[in-house]
Amino acid sequence: MRSSVTNKGCPSRLAVPKELRDDYYYNALYTEELDFRLLGQQNPEFEAVLERGSHLDFNNPKSVMQLTKTILKQDFNLTVDLPMDRLCPPVPNRHNYILWLKDLLDSSSTPYFDSSEPARQVTGLDIGTGASLIYPLLGCVQRPSWSFVATDVDAKSLSYARKNVELNNMQSRIRVVGRTITDCLIPLDELGLETIDFTMVNPPFYTSEAELKDLAKQKSRPPNSACTGAPVEMVCAGGEIGFIQRMIDESLVLRERVQWYTCMLGKQSSLEVLVNILKGHGVTNYAITTFVQGNKTRRWAIGWSFGDKRPSLSASRGCEPSAGKKILPEPTEVTVVMRSSSQIKPEQLERAVCDMMVGLGLDSWSWSKQLLKGLGFVNGKVWSRACRRKKARERGNLVPVGGDTAEDESSSSRQKKPKQPVEQGTTQCMFGFLLNIQVLGDTNDKSQVAIVARWLQGNDHAIFESFTGFLRKAILSSIQEQCSIIDLHVMNYMKTYILDDPVNLTAF
Ligand code: SAH
């Protein structure tokens, strides 16, 4: 059988010393097909389970287990002991979940640059960690400031999980806790934790053993996961929806004590059901994604938050759901592109944007010339016509007829220091955004200049929409002579829209 496990390619991976493995290294793992022959040449124990030097029998649990152990060692320097009668986790899929979590947390944390905050102490709860303890191990290896509480209800899995903590010397960072099936799933009080950063779970997918067998008959077994799962790992009351419904119920009580509640799903149809349940409870800050592994196995994931930090597009809209766009969360990025014929230079746009923002009198605004990025926070829609009229009155100016052009704002801003405007009757919710000027394509005359507005904080998407609407109009009028612009409401999915490389935050 051909491998559908993909990998960046062994030689380049091995060339990266362990201490230099960073997010770039981890992001690149499993993006290309794994070369079993090469892996075997480098790992005698793996070579021993290969047939004819390059073929792996995915129906043989021993071979699959060796594959998992070998790539955990080679790619993450992890050592695990696994029982034959429990789930043997396919590493690429589990790694995908960790990559998504990193994106979700990094893009909704305080540096506001969609990049990691290495010193941020992050605590996660892995519900149903299994014998392998795979998620806490993968998370701790990749992020030195992460720690985990890992729970399970199965005595055998718990004893292996504890052993795997020790095998990897993670006693100070991973706590394994036994639970019973009727206990709550997120026991923050019992654990003595006031708040944590995330919960994660790969729940039992099926409602009964009969359903498991039925579904297994209908489709061929996923090629990279000879299923050694025990019933407790595969089946629970209500299947995955039942399990996650319990999590949702608990989250409605705990609310912001956990920043992100997340779950993996085995069935795409569960996404729509869960999004509707969340929306029914008024939750709008949620994220959905898919984990693609080889060309057959696909999993989905959902995360939700009661906080007001908004994640990146790649984290929140990482899939094109079969249920349609209606179940996607609101987009958190909008790009406004100047047509190449406009010949607008980045410096012109920078000046226009900065004048405009200063003129608005935001509660806080800072601009990095080096990064061409600016960060703004404000309470209320200070860009609204009513608010700007009021400000103009306070300045003692006559309000110009239709006086809502950006030029009025930006030119006056140079003369007067902005003060904090809070208008009666506007939504008093903290709204945070990042503006980033980008040059698309080559830096020759034909290149296009764009401004990307990223919604960072706030509870109301309508405010972000209103802000980007203002921004578009204001840019047009402030550089009107030669400018025509295209709005690119980014409705697309993962990775089609790429922000700058992660930046050095201390430079800001
Ligand atoms: N996280 C592992 C195992 C997933 S299988 C992996 O991804 O490979 C699901 C796990 O959830 C099993 O280990 C099962 O014992 C555990 N489980 C089932 N019900 C649970 C509950 N109520 N609380 C905690 N763990 C539970």
Image (cartoon, helix red, strand yellow):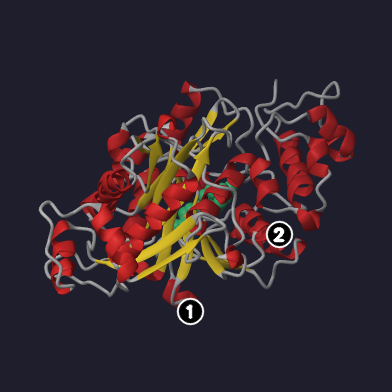
Which quadrant is the C terminus positioned in? bottom right
Q: Amino acid at mark 2?
A: Asn
Q: Earlier in the sequence, mark 1 or mark 2?
A: 2
Q: Nearer the viewer, mark 1 or mark 2?
A: 1
Q: Residue at x 29, y 41 (%)?
A: 273
CA gap, disc 1 and disc 2 = 24 Å
Q: Residue at x 30, y 60 (%)?
A: 411
Q: Amino acid at mark 1?
A: Gly
Q: Residue at x 60, y 54 (%)?
A: 135
Q: Quadrant of residue 20?
A: bottom right
Element type where label 1 sits in the image: loop
**Residue 427 or 314: which is nearer the viewer?**
427
Residue picked out by circle 1: 192
Label placed on residue 404: none
Tell me if residue 199 comes above or below residue 424 in the rendering: above
Asked whether, in this view, residue 214 is left or right of residue 356, the answer is right
Label placed on residue 164: 2
Tell me if residue 2 comes above or below residue 19 in the rendering: above
Tell me if residue 258 comes above or below residue 281 in the rendering: below
Tell me if residue 42 comes above or below residue 167 in the rendering: above
Q: Quadrant of residue 270?
A: top left
Element type where label 2 sits in the image: helix
Residue 121 visible in the snapshot: yes
Q: Quadrant of residue 282?
A: bottom left
